[in-house]
Amino acid sequence: MERPITKRNTPPALILCCVDYRYIEAIQAFVKRRLGVAAYDLKTDAGGTKALLDGDAAVRTWMLHNIRLAYQRHGVRTVVLVHHEDCAAYGGSATFKDRAKETAFHAQQLAMAASLLRSSFQRLTVRMFYAHRARRRIVFADIVG
């Protein structure tokens, strides 16, 4: 039987993001301060959601297994997906014609990962963000989808 959700037992979130050291601290601070999430599980892999989408069934199964554990054991009902500019797992910014193309590509990848997660877990809210540098700071753009 599930416990009713109150402020004291609000389920943690799951952050799924890239392993890139340039963004980890900023992502955690963003989730805590801007999204108001006090407790979270953190899953990092090169490219963030790339392993869910790259076509390797065994890797996708492993990723979904990890997410399922957080969902079942920790009561996670919100997943925060974060991609970032100049991601080496996707070939870096040089792979794209311009910044707009890079942003659009990552928004598409995030939307596909969100769709996969929503179809795999009934009561899951998925939030998507794209991080990029602007004047010596990291800015998070909310991706709607």
Image (cartoon, helix red, strand yellow):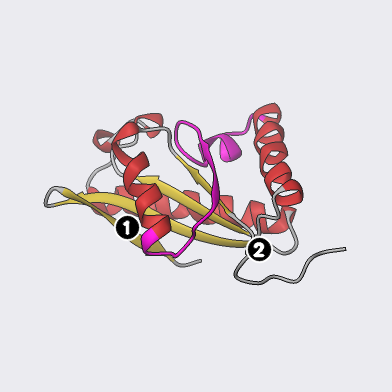
Q: Which mark is residue 9?
A: 2
What residue type is disc 1 on? Phe
> Residue 96's quadrant in the figure?
top left
Q: Position of residue 132 (x, y in %)?
A: 26, 50
Mark 1 surroundings: few (<14), some (14-19) or many (≥20) residues within 10 A = many
Q: Residue furthest right?
A: 1
Q: Which part of the image, by quadrant, shows the N terminus? A: bottom right
Q: Position of residue 117 (x, y in %)?
A: 65, 53
Q: Which mark is residue 104?
A: none
Q: Are marks 1 and 2 in contact (CB under 8 Å)?
A: no
Tell me which residue sits at (22%, 47%) in the image: 98
Q: In the rendered structure, which segment of residues is drawn in magenta?
A: 33-56
What residue type is disc 2 on? Asn
Mark 2 surroundings: few (<14), some (14-19) or many (≥20) residues within 10 A = few
Total residue callouts:
2
Q: Position of residue 71 (x, y in %)?
A: 71, 51
Q: Would you name the residue on which mark 1 appears? A: 140
Tell me which residue sits at (62%, 33%) in the image: 55
> Residue 25's quadrant in the figure?
top left
Q: Nearer the viewer, residue 63 or 10?
A: 10
